[in-house]
Image (cartoon, rainbow, N blue to C red):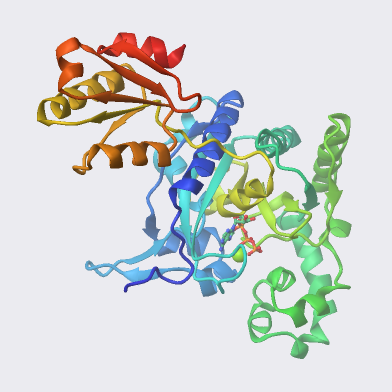
Amino acid sequence: MIQRPKGTKDILPQDTYIWQFIEDNTKQVFKNYGFQEIRVPVFEHTELFERGVGDTTDVVQKEMYTFNDKGGRSITLRPEGTAGVVRAYIENGMASLPNPVKLWYNMSMYRYENVQKGRLREFHQIGAELFGSSSYEADVEVICLAKRIIDSLEIENVKLMLNSIGCPTCRQTYQVVLKEWIADKLDKYCETCKSRFEKNPMRILDCKEKNCIQLNQEAPVILNYLCKECKEHFEKLKNTLNKLCINYEIDSKIVRGLDYYTKSVFEFIDEKEGLTVLAGGRYDELVKELDGQDIPAIGFAMGMERIVELFKRKETKIKVPIPEIYIAQIGEDANIFATNLVEKLRNINIYAQKDVTGKALKSQFKYADKIGCKYVLTIGETELEKGKANLKDMITGEETLVVLNEIELAKHIEA
Ligand code: ATP
Ligand code: MG
C-alpha cells in the first residue's frame, strides 16, 4: 500500500467541517477589517525566498523544497506566504491602489522540517498583510485583527507576546554587542550557528538546538538597543494596546524565523502546549528588498493545523449536516420517480438523498437510519398511483401521508 509522504496529513470529512468553520469565520472577520483575498502560485523562483526570507534562515538553508524544472529553472514550493504576496503586490502595481492595501490569503506551505507535534512538511496558513503604513496604528490594527480571529473562534488560553527587533539602524549597534557576547563561547554553539556568526548573528538567537537555546539564555536583547524612532514606535503601540485593554506580555526573546522582520513582532501562544498558533510582525524593508518601492508593511500568519487542534479541545462541537430526507423506493418506476423527486428537492435547497447502489428496501431503511436522516419517505407502485406516500419522522416515529410533490414535502420537513 502506498502511504502518504512523511509530514503530510489527510484531512478527513469530520475535520474538514472544522476547517470550513474556521475559514468561514476568518473570512467574515477579514471582510469587516477591509482585507481582500489574494491567491499566489504554489511555486516561485527560488531567488524570491532566498532574498525575501533570507539566505541564513532555517527556512532557506534547511527547509525548502527546491528543484530544477524541465526548463532548468530553480523552483521552490512556497515555504511561507509573505514573499509571494509581496512579489505579487510589486508585479501587479498594487502600490498605485488606494493606500493602505490590505490583503489576506489561505494557502498550503511546504517545509522540509523535523516532523513532530505541530510541525508538518505540508501545512496551511491563513495570513494577512497590510502594505503602505509605517505608523504604529497599522500594528494596532493588524494585532486587533489577529486577536479578533482567535476570539471569534472562542479559543481560550491563548496569549499575545510582543517584542520589537528594531530596524537596520539599531541592529548595527546591537550586532556588535551581540557578537562580542557570543564570540568567546562560539565554539560551544552548533555548526549552523557558527556559520551564521559573521553574516547574521541574530539568527543564532532563533536556533532550535537545546544546547544553543541554553547558551542564549543570558544574551543581550535588542529591546535595550532600540534607536529613538523604534523605541517611540514601540511605546505608542504598547500604550494603544493598553488603552484598548488588549493584554500582552513582552518577550524580548522573540526574534522570528524569517529575516525580513523589523520593529514590532508578535506571537499568539497556546499556554497549554506552548505552541505558537499565529505569528507576525512588521517588514518595512521587504518590498524595497524585492525591487519594489520603499513601502512599509506588516502582517501575520496563523497555522491552521495548530488552530484546528486547539478548536478540537473545546467542548462545543461543529454540527455535521445530516440529510433532511431520504427517499426509499421499490420497483423501477418508483426508482426513477424518486430520482426526479430528490433532484427537485435539491433544486429548492433541501439536503435529500436516495439509494444509488441498488440496495433492497430494508437496507435502504437501515442506511437512512445509520446516517441519521430526519425523515424517510417510502415510495412503491401503490404510492405512485395515489400520488401520496408515508413520510416518517425518524425522531418521533410519527408517520404522515403526504402529497408527492417537493413543495408539499418541504412544508412538512421545515415545519
Ligand atoms: P518556528 O520558529 O516555531 O519554526 P517560524 O518562524 O518558522 O516558527 P512562521 O514561519 O512565522 O514560523 O509560521 C507562522 C505560524 O505557522 C507558526 O506560528 C505555526 O503556527 C505555523 N507553522 C509554521 N511552521 C509550521 C509547520 N512546519 N507545521 C505546522 N505549522 C507550522
Ligand atoms: Mg520554523
Q: Residue at x 67, y 71 (%)?
A: 200
Residue 90 sits above or below residue 163 on the image? above
User: Going by the image, does 176 lie left or right of 143?
Assistant: right
User: What is the x, y in percent for residue 39?
Assistant: 41, 42
The answer to whether residue 193 is seen in the rendering is yes
User: What is the x, y in percent for residue 361?
Assistant: 25, 36
Q: As drawn, which residue projects farthest toward the bottom?
A: 187
Question: Foreground residue, 18 or 370?
Answer: 370
Classify the position of ligand 1 by quadrant: top left, top right, bottom left or bottom right. Answer: bottom right
Residue 122 sits above or below residue 295 on the image? below
The answer to whether residue 85 is seen in the rendering is no
User: What is the x, y in percent for residue 86?
Assistant: 49, 46
User: Going by the image, does 124 lie left or right of 366?
Assistant: right
User: Going by the image, does 19 lie left or right of 393?
Assistant: right
Quadrant, the N terminus: bottom left
Question: Foreground residue, 10 or 131?
Answer: 10
